[in-house]
Amino acid sequence: MTTYRDAGVDIDAGNETVRRIKPLVRTTFTPGVLADIGAFGSAFEPQFDQYREPVLISSVDGVGTKLKVAFRAGKHDTIGQDLVNHCVNDIAVCGAVPLFFLDYLSTGKLEPAVAEDVICGLVAACKENGCALIGGETAEMPDIYAAGEYDIAGTVVGIVEKSGILDGRKVVPGDRLIGIRSSGLHTNGYSLARRVLFERYDIGDTPPELGGLSVGEALLSVHRPYLALIRAVCDTVHAFVHVTGGGIAGNAARVIRDPLTFTIDWEAWQRPPIFELIQRLGSVPEDDMRRTFNLGIGLIVIASEGDARSLIATLRVLGEDPVCVGTVTAAGNDSA
């Protein structure tokens, strides 16, 4: 006799996972949530009264091979934060505020304690960003993943007034690019970072360049949430750039489009030590560094030249250390 458990799928572990996470997930519920965890579909009733032309903005993403660092460290409670913050930042730079989030967690063998840690991270970030974690899926798929490994992805849905969508249309020549610091690699560039760092160091090693942090702590630093900052200044800016895969120039080009271009002053800020360490140990070419990593700038605020000074002052009041990293120019100039 062969059972489903013999084949690698443990229904009891799935039920235990749901039992553990239900009370956690409920703490994120907002008034719009209409269905509890466990329904076939998640129901959310949006309140459109304050909008004349409401537009829904959505984003879906994962956290890439940062997961490999979490597996190596045996630390899973921050991965969920990375996922939510990345997705929310993506819609926030479009002018939207998040309404709800859904996740998908898949693994070869479901470990309820690990799944609970991951969901705790999702819950923490959803609460910080004011969005409800209204549903998700946990899948046990033997033979797909190595022992102790899993993958996670998520989708966020937010709302914005149509006239408030920020898509680069307001950007004009002379606008300034004001950089906001990242908290580390965020969720991009980990294949290169792991290749370089783990050839020399183990997860718990503390290279002197990292100022007392271990390699694992530096690499697992949580992807910063920028929603609150964006909402505080969005009425006075022309666009935002969430610096993810593709680096500063690659992402700035998503909102600064023909017939415009931009210049970046790569010497305008000091890169965090983790990036310097990766480049030195791996002899990574500068062009690769710029295209792979955020290099310490996780968000760019694009504002008029006339507003830049007062905006920088406002950002400092908000606790930021902003720096002018570039300028929008006429097409034909070098954006490198």
Image (cartoon, helix red, strand yellow):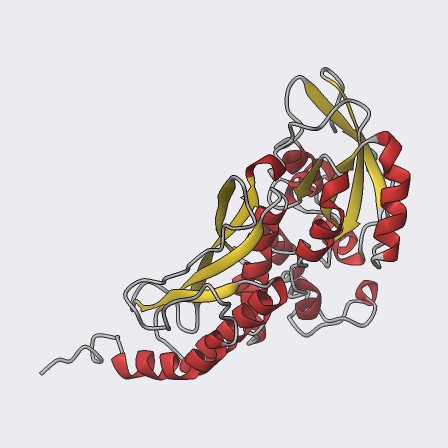
Q: Position of residue 121 (x, y in %)?
A: 56, 71
In the rendered view, would you say 272 is above or below 5? above
Q: Quadrant of residue 258?
A: top right
* Left or right of 323 in this view: 106: left
Q: Position of residue 118 (x, y in %)?
A: 50, 72
* Left or right of 101 in this view: 205: right
Looking at the picture, tell me which residue is in the foreground, 219 or 37. Answer: 37
Q: Position of residue 130 (x, y in %)?
A: 59, 64
Residue drawn 74% across the image and 52% down it: 232
Residue ranking furthest to the front:
49
In the rendered view, would you say 92 is above or below 163? below
Residue drawn 53% across the image and 68% down it: 122
The answer to whether one can see residue 63 in this image is no
Q: Position of residue 70 (x, y in %)?
A: 56, 69
Residue ranking furthest to the left:
1
Residue drawn 83% across the image and 34% down it: 265
Residue drawn 44% across the image and 79% down it: 21
The quadrant of the picture occupied by the N terminus is bottom left
In the rendered view, would you say 223 is above or below 290? below
The quadrant of the picture occupied by the C terminus is top right
Looking at the picture, tell me which residue is in the foreground, 288 or 100. Answer: 100
Task: Give the total number of marks visible in the rendering.
Answer: 0
The answer to whether one can see residue 192 in this image is yes
Q: Quadrant of residue 22?
A: bottom left
Looking at the picture, tell me which residue is in the foreground, 247 or 23. Answer: 23
* Left or right of 118 in this view: 207: right
